[in-house]
Amino acid sequence: MAEDSIVSENSKTYSTDEVLFFRDVIELLLTKDYLSSGDIMKQREGVYNYTESEKDALLERLGVDRWLQRSSRGYWETGPRTYLELRPFLESLVREIEESEPEEDALTRTLLAKLPQ
């Protein structure tokens, strides 16, 4: 499973919960392009045992490591490292969205088109 490979590749620097949190953020970014820190804090509240400051610190760390990046307006976006190193994972997430919502075929094409070539 793609998720397992991400966990194993990054287990030296990120815990499993941190990787799962990142996965949730990436799923949101596939459909929204960018997110505010507040949007991310509201997502899946109670699923992770992180305080807001811990989530914010994790986002900053993901930014430093280039998995995420901040736009010029301060929003979180998918970082270049995510596109470069996790493209197969991103494509599998898009396929999962397609399978769960087959009527969203146009959305799937749009999401795949957004991935840099």
Image (cartoon, rainbow, N blue to C red):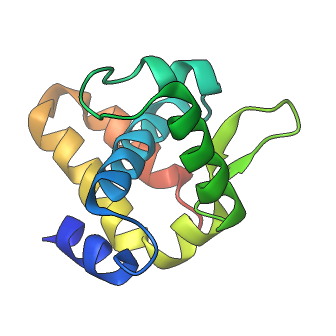
Left or right: residue 60 versus residue 19 is right
Q: Is residue 14 left or right of 67 when viewed as pictured?
A: left
Q: Count the marks.
A: 0
Q: Residue at x 51, y 37 (%)?
A: 55
Single out the residue that lies furthest toward the right: 72
Q: Is residue 73 above or below residue 110?
A: above
- Foreground: 34 or 44? 44
- Residue 88 in percent (x, y) is at 34, 72
Expressed as whole percent of the image width and height from the top left, the position of residue 1 reads: 12, 71
Whole-percent x, y for residue 110 in the image: 45, 41
Residue drawn where x is 53% and y is 65% of the image: 82
Q: Nearer the viewer, residue 51 or 1?
A: 51
Q: Quadrant of the C terminus?
A: bottom right
Residue drawn at point x = 35 percent, y = 50 percent? 23
Q: Is residue 68 visible?
A: no
The answer to whether residue 49 is above or below residue 64 is above
Q: In this orientation, does residue 45 appear?
A: yes
Name which quarter of the figure residue 57 lies in: top right
Q: Is residue 115 left or right of residue 105?
A: right
Image coordinates of residue 38 in percent, x first then y, are 59, 18
Residue located at (25% from left, 29% from top): 104
**Depth check: 34 or 50 in front?**
50
Q: Is residue 44 above or below residue 97?
A: above
**With respect to residue 65, does 94 lie above or below?**
above
